[in-house]
Amino acid sequence: MKVMVGHSLRGLNFTTVPVARHIAVKESVFPFTKLGNVDVLLGPEMRSTGEVMGIDQDFGWAFAKSQAAAGLSLPHTGTIIMSVKNGDKPGTVDVAERLQALGFKLQATRGTAAYLLERGLNVEAVNKVKEGRPHLVDHIKNRQAQLVVNTVGTASSHHDSLPIRREALQQNIPYFTTIQGIQAAVTAIEAMRKSSLTIKPLQDYHPT
Protein backbone atom coordinates (compact mmCIF):
# COMPACT_ATOMS: atom_id res chain seq x y z
CA MET A 1 0.00 0.00 0.00
CA LYS A 2 1.43 3.36 -1.04
CA VAL A 3 1.52 6.04 1.66
CA MET A 4 0.39 9.40 0.23
CA VAL A 5 0.93 11.62 3.29
CA GLY A 6 3.96 13.89 2.93
CA HIS A 7 4.35 13.36 -0.82
CA SER A 8 3.67 15.88 -3.56
CA LEU A 9 1.26 15.09 -6.39
CA ARG A 10 4.21 15.16 -8.77
CA GLY A 11 6.05 12.70 -6.55
CA LEU A 12 3.04 10.39 -6.73
CA ASN A 13 3.03 10.77 -10.52
CA PHE A 14 -0.40 12.38 -10.38
CA THR A 15 0.13 15.31 -12.72
CA THR A 16 -2.85 15.16 -15.05
CA VAL A 17 -6.57 15.49 -14.36
CA PRO A 18 -8.75 12.72 -15.82
CA VAL A 19 -11.23 13.98 -18.41
CA ALA A 20 -14.74 12.84 -17.53
CA ARG A 21 -16.78 11.58 -20.48
CA HIS A 22 -20.00 11.48 -18.51
CA ILE A 23 -22.14 13.60 -16.20
CA ALA A 24 -23.30 12.50 -12.74
CA VAL A 25 -26.20 14.20 -10.96
CA LYS A 26 -26.59 13.58 -7.23
CA GLU A 27 -30.05 13.95 -5.70
CA SER A 28 -30.83 14.01 -1.99
CA VAL A 29 -33.78 12.02 -0.67
CA PHE A 30 -35.90 13.44 2.15
CA PRO A 31 -38.61 11.62 4.17
CA PHE A 32 -41.26 14.30 3.56
CA THR A 33 -44.07 11.77 3.01
CA LYS A 34 -43.55 10.45 6.55
CA LEU A 35 -43.63 13.88 8.17
CA GLY A 36 -47.17 15.27 8.38
CA ASN A 37 -47.21 18.99 7.64
CA VAL A 38 -43.50 19.63 7.12
CA ASP A 39 -42.84 22.02 4.24
CA VAL A 40 -40.78 20.63 1.38
CA LEU A 41 -38.90 23.90 0.88
CA LEU A 42 -35.35 23.09 1.87
CA GLY A 43 -33.67 24.86 4.77
CA PRO A 44 -30.12 24.71 6.14
CA GLU A 45 -31.24 22.59 9.10
CA MET A 46 -32.66 19.77 6.97
CA ARG A 47 -30.82 16.49 6.54
CA SER A 48 -31.41 13.94 3.85
CA THR A 49 -31.99 10.28 4.61
CA GLY A 50 -29.94 9.23 1.63
CA GLU A 51 -28.69 10.16 -1.80
CA VAL A 52 -29.14 8.75 -5.28
CA MET A 53 -27.29 9.39 -8.51
CA GLY A 54 -28.09 9.57 -12.19
CA ILE A 55 -25.23 9.09 -14.65
CA ASP A 56 -25.14 9.49 -18.42
CA GLN A 57 -23.15 11.12 -21.21
CA ASP A 58 -25.99 13.64 -21.56
CA PHE A 59 -26.93 16.05 -18.75
CA GLY A 60 -30.65 15.81 -19.50
CA TRP A 61 -30.70 12.04 -19.16
CA ALA A 62 -28.45 12.14 -16.07
CA PHE A 63 -30.91 14.50 -14.39
CA ALA A 64 -33.91 12.41 -15.46
CA LYS A 65 -32.30 9.29 -13.99
CA SER A 66 -31.56 11.07 -10.71
CA GLN A 67 -35.21 12.10 -10.38
CA ALA A 68 -36.45 8.61 -11.18
CA ALA A 69 -34.05 7.16 -8.61
CA ALA A 70 -35.50 9.57 -6.02
CA GLY A 71 -39.01 8.36 -6.87
CA LEU A 72 -40.17 11.17 -9.17
CA SER A 73 -40.51 10.27 -12.84
CA LEU A 74 -40.67 13.33 -15.09
CA PRO A 75 -43.71 13.51 -17.41
CA HIS A 76 -43.57 13.24 -21.20
CA THR A 77 -46.92 15.00 -21.69
CA GLY A 78 -49.65 16.75 -19.73
CA THR A 79 -50.19 19.99 -17.83
CA ILE A 80 -47.68 22.14 -15.96
CA ILE A 81 -48.84 24.44 -13.16
CA MET A 82 -46.64 27.44 -12.37
CA SER A 83 -46.79 29.92 -9.50
CA VAL A 84 -43.60 31.94 -9.03
CA LYS A 85 -42.42 35.04 -7.20
CA ASN A 86 -41.91 38.29 -9.11
CA GLY A 87 -38.14 37.98 -9.22
CA ASP A 88 -38.40 34.59 -10.93
CA LYS A 89 -40.95 35.56 -13.57
CA PRO A 90 -38.32 36.45 -16.25
CA GLY A 91 -36.84 32.98 -15.85
CA THR A 92 -40.19 31.35 -16.56
CA VAL A 93 -40.38 32.67 -20.14
CA ASP A 94 -37.75 30.36 -21.65
CA VAL A 95 -39.05 27.46 -19.57
CA ALA A 96 -42.63 28.05 -20.70
CA GLU A 97 -41.59 28.40 -24.35
CA ARG A 98 -39.71 25.10 -24.24
CA LEU A 99 -42.56 23.31 -22.48
CA GLN A 100 -45.08 24.67 -24.94
CA ALA A 101 -42.89 23.54 -27.84
CA LEU A 102 -42.94 20.05 -26.30
CA GLY A 103 -46.74 20.10 -26.34
CA PHE A 104 -47.41 20.67 -22.65
CA LYS A 105 -50.44 22.66 -21.53
CA LEU A 106 -49.52 25.59 -19.28
CA GLN A 107 -51.50 26.82 -16.28
CA ALA A 108 -50.40 29.55 -13.88
CA THR A 109 -51.68 31.74 -11.09
CA ARG A 110 -52.88 35.11 -12.31
CA GLY A 111 -49.71 37.15 -11.85
CA THR A 112 -47.50 34.53 -13.50
CA ALA A 113 -50.09 33.90 -16.23
CA ALA A 114 -50.38 37.62 -17.05
CA TYR A 115 -46.61 37.93 -17.31
CA LEU A 116 -46.39 34.99 -19.73
CA LEU A 117 -49.45 36.04 -21.76
CA GLU A 118 -47.86 39.46 -22.33
CA ARG A 119 -44.91 37.64 -23.87
CA GLY A 120 -46.94 35.58 -26.29
CA LEU A 121 -47.34 32.34 -24.34
CA ASN A 122 -50.60 30.41 -24.30
CA VAL A 123 -51.38 30.08 -20.59
CA GLU A 124 -54.57 29.38 -18.67
CA ALA A 125 -55.00 31.35 -15.44
CA VAL A 126 -55.99 29.38 -12.33
CA ASN A 127 -57.04 30.52 -8.87
CA LYS A 128 -54.81 30.61 -5.86
CA VAL A 129 -56.29 28.86 -2.81
CA LYS A 130 -57.47 32.13 -1.26
CA GLU A 131 -59.19 33.15 -4.53
CA GLY A 132 -61.80 30.39 -4.32
CA ARG A 133 -62.48 27.01 -5.85
CA PRO A 134 -61.64 25.40 -8.13
CA HIS A 135 -58.05 26.43 -7.38
CA LEU A 136 -54.66 25.05 -8.29
CA VAL A 137 -54.54 22.70 -5.29
CA ASP A 138 -57.81 21.16 -6.51
CA HIS A 139 -56.17 20.62 -9.90
CA ILE A 140 -53.19 18.91 -8.26
CA LYS A 141 -55.41 16.78 -6.01
CA ASN A 142 -57.45 15.67 -9.03
CA ARG A 143 -54.21 14.87 -10.87
CA GLN A 144 -54.98 17.42 -13.57
CA ALA A 145 -51.33 18.50 -13.37
CA GLN A 146 -48.27 16.38 -14.14
CA LEU A 147 -45.62 18.81 -12.83
CA VAL A 148 -45.66 21.77 -10.44
CA VAL A 149 -43.38 24.81 -10.29
CA ASN A 150 -43.65 26.95 -7.15
CA THR A 151 -41.17 29.57 -5.94
CA VAL A 152 -41.82 31.94 -3.05
CA GLY A 153 -40.40 35.19 -1.73
CA THR A 154 -42.16 36.71 1.28
CA ALA A 155 -43.06 34.89 4.48
CA SER A 156 -46.77 35.23 3.67
CA SER A 157 -46.36 33.71 0.20
CA HIS A 158 -44.29 30.95 1.78
CA HIS A 159 -47.18 30.14 4.12
CA ASP A 160 -49.93 30.57 1.51
CA SER A 161 -48.28 28.22 -0.98
CA LEU A 162 -47.58 25.40 1.48
CA PRO A 163 -50.73 23.46 0.39
CA ILE A 164 -49.44 23.46 -3.21
CA ARG A 165 -46.20 21.75 -2.30
CA ARG A 166 -47.78 19.35 0.19
CA GLU A 167 -50.45 18.20 -2.28
CA ALA A 168 -47.90 17.68 -5.05
CA LEU A 169 -45.92 15.57 -2.60
CA GLN A 170 -48.96 13.52 -1.55
CA GLN A 171 -49.90 12.87 -5.18
CA ASN A 172 -46.28 11.98 -6.07
CA ILE A 173 -46.25 14.72 -8.72
CA PRO A 174 -42.80 16.18 -9.53
CA TYR A 175 -42.41 19.68 -8.14
CA PHE A 176 -39.64 22.26 -8.35
CA THR A 177 -39.10 25.22 -6.04
CA THR A 178 -36.35 27.00 -7.98
CA ILE A 179 -36.02 28.23 -11.55
CA GLN A 180 -32.73 26.36 -11.87
CA GLY A 181 -34.54 23.16 -10.91
CA ILE A 182 -37.28 23.48 -13.52
CA GLN A 183 -34.72 24.47 -16.16
CA ALA A 184 -32.87 21.22 -15.49
CA ALA A 185 -36.16 19.30 -15.57
CA VAL A 186 -37.11 20.73 -18.95
CA THR A 187 -33.68 19.80 -20.32
CA ALA A 188 -34.30 16.28 -19.03
CA ILE A 189 -37.74 16.07 -20.65
CA GLU A 190 -36.25 17.25 -23.94
CA ALA A 191 -33.59 14.54 -23.70
CA MET A 192 -36.23 11.90 -22.95
CA ARG A 193 -38.13 12.95 -26.06
CA LYS A 194 -35.04 12.75 -28.28
CA SER A 195 -33.62 9.38 -27.28
CA SER A 196 -34.40 6.25 -25.32
CA LEU A 197 -33.12 5.32 -21.89
CA THR A 198 -29.72 3.63 -21.85
CA ILE A 199 -28.22 1.77 -18.92
CA LYS A 200 -24.56 0.86 -18.53
CA PRO A 201 -22.54 -0.59 -15.64
CA LEU A 202 -20.28 1.82 -13.75
CA GLN A 203 -17.26 -0.06 -15.10
CA ASP A 204 -18.09 1.23 -18.58
CA TYR A 205 -17.83 4.81 -17.31
CA HIS A 206 -14.54 4.13 -15.51
CA PRO A 207 -12.54 1.74 -17.68
CA THR A 208 -9.26 0.65 -16.14
Image (tube, grey):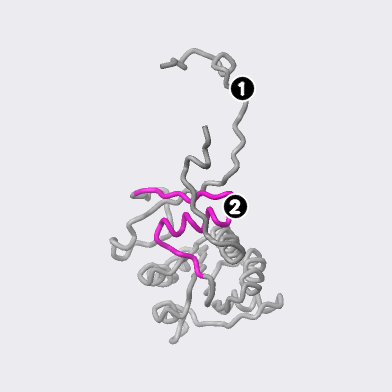
Of residue 192 and residue 9, the one placed in the foreground of this image is 192
Q: Quadrant of the N terminus?
A: top left
Pointer 2: what residue?
Answer: 58
Instruction: Assess disc 2: are there few (<14), some (14-19) or many (≥20) residues with their C-alpha within 10 Å of its C-alpha.
Output: some
Residue at point 51%, 49% (across, down) = 55
Could you say whether the residue bearing mark 1 is in a helix, strand or loop? loop
170 vs 119, left or right, is: left
Q: Is residue 182 visible?
A: no
Q: Are marks 1 and 2 in contact (CB under 8 Å)?
A: no
* Residue 171 lies in the magenta stretch: no
Residue 173 visible in this rendered orientation of the protein: yes
Q: Position of residue 191 (x, y in %)?
A: 59, 61
Is label 2 in a helix, a strand or a loop?
loop
Pick the front one: 43 or 73: 73
- Distance from the alpha carbon under mark 1 to that under mark 2: 28 Å
What residue type is disc 2 on?
Answer: Asp
Left or right: residue 120 compared with residue 72: right
Mark 1: which amino acid?
Thr
What residue span does the magenta drawing correspond to?
50-75
Residue drawn 52% across the image and 74% down it? 81
Query: In terms of depth relative to the viewer, which is nearer, 39 or 21?
Result: 21
When asked about the image quadrant of residue 17, the answer is top right
Q: Is residue 103 above or below residue 186?
A: below
Residue at x 32%, y 63% (from the top left corner): 33
Residue 196's image quarter?
bottom right
Residue, far bottom: 133
Instruction: Judge by depth and name the residue closer to the eye, 197 or 28.
Output: 197
Q: In the picture shown, does residue 134 fall above or below 68?
A: below
Q: Earlier in the sequence, mark 1 or mark 2?
A: 1
Query: Which residue position is annotated with label 1?
Result: 15
Q: Position of residue 137 (x, y in %)?
A: 42, 78
